[in-house]
Image (cartoon, rainbow, N blue to C red):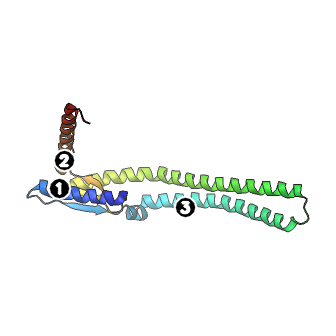
Amino acid sequence: MKRLLTALMSVLVMISFTGLAGAQELKIAYIDPQILLNDSLAGKDVVSKIEKFRQEKQTVIQDQEADIKKLGEEISAKSLTMTQEAKDKKELEYQKKIKEFNRVVKDSQDELEEKYNVLLKPVKETLDEIINDYGKKNGFDIILDVRRAGVVYASDRIDITKDILKIYDDTYQAKAKKGTK
């Protein structure tokens, strides 16, 4: 729903820009950030580091999973010959290992996401600078992100933020004077 609203807003903004631009043509382009990430040297480096980190975490998870499976098989195989107290103790141990396993999986996912964001942040910042410079140097009015339907770069020539802000403030003040906000 959020993506649809963003796309709709982008279309409405572009339509309003066409009327504001008058006889001047808008120069619009888009980028695909996934291609930039997958095909750039920096992006490939980030993906490689993330994959290495993921494999390390996966090894730990697989080891714990094997321990849990082994304990489960032991409980199943020996349950007929065990005392109730021994069964309860093994079952409690089994439940603790499952709980710890689930925590390790969740922590690993969180760490992987955090590491991805940390490694990707400088790549995104550099790309933003490059896109802004490219947009200015090549006379683009808008550069869109094809994956998120968001504007990556917009020329100051088509920025109507101040106009909208003034209208909004005027409307707000008029309502305040009437006593309704």
Q: Which of marks 1 and 2 is nearer the N terminus?
A: 1
Which residue is at a point 37% across and 51% down the rendered structure image?
126
Identify the element where label 3 is drawn. helix
Q: Which amino acid does label 2 sit on?
A: Ile
Identify the element where label 2 is drawn. loop
| Residue linked to disc 3 | 51
**Which residue is nearer to you in this view: 106 or 87?**
87
Which residue is at a point 37% across and 59% down the rendered structure image?
1
Disc 3 to disc 2, C-alpha distance: 43 Å
Which residue is at a point 82% across and 63% down the rendered structure image?
75
Q: Can you give x and y, in whole percent of width and height, for residue 62 in the image?
A: 68, 63
Compared across the picture, whether 155 is left or right of 40 comes to left
| Residue linked to disc 2 | 160
In this rendering, the label closer to the viewer, 3 or 1: 1
**Which residue is nearer to you in this view: 106 or 177?**
177
When asked about the image quadrant of residue 162, the answer is top left
| Residue linked to disc 1 | 16
Disc 1 to disc 2, C-alpha distance: 10 Å
| Marks 1 and 2 close (CB-CB < 8 Å) | yes
Quarter placement of the C terminus: top left
**Which residue is nearer to you in this view: 160 or 33?**
160
Q: Can you give x and y, in whole percent of width and height, for residue 80 in the image?
A: 89, 66
Identify the element where label 1 is drawn. helix
Q: Earlier in the sequence, mark 3 or mark 2?
A: 3
Q: Which of marks 3 and 1 is nearer the N terminus?
A: 1
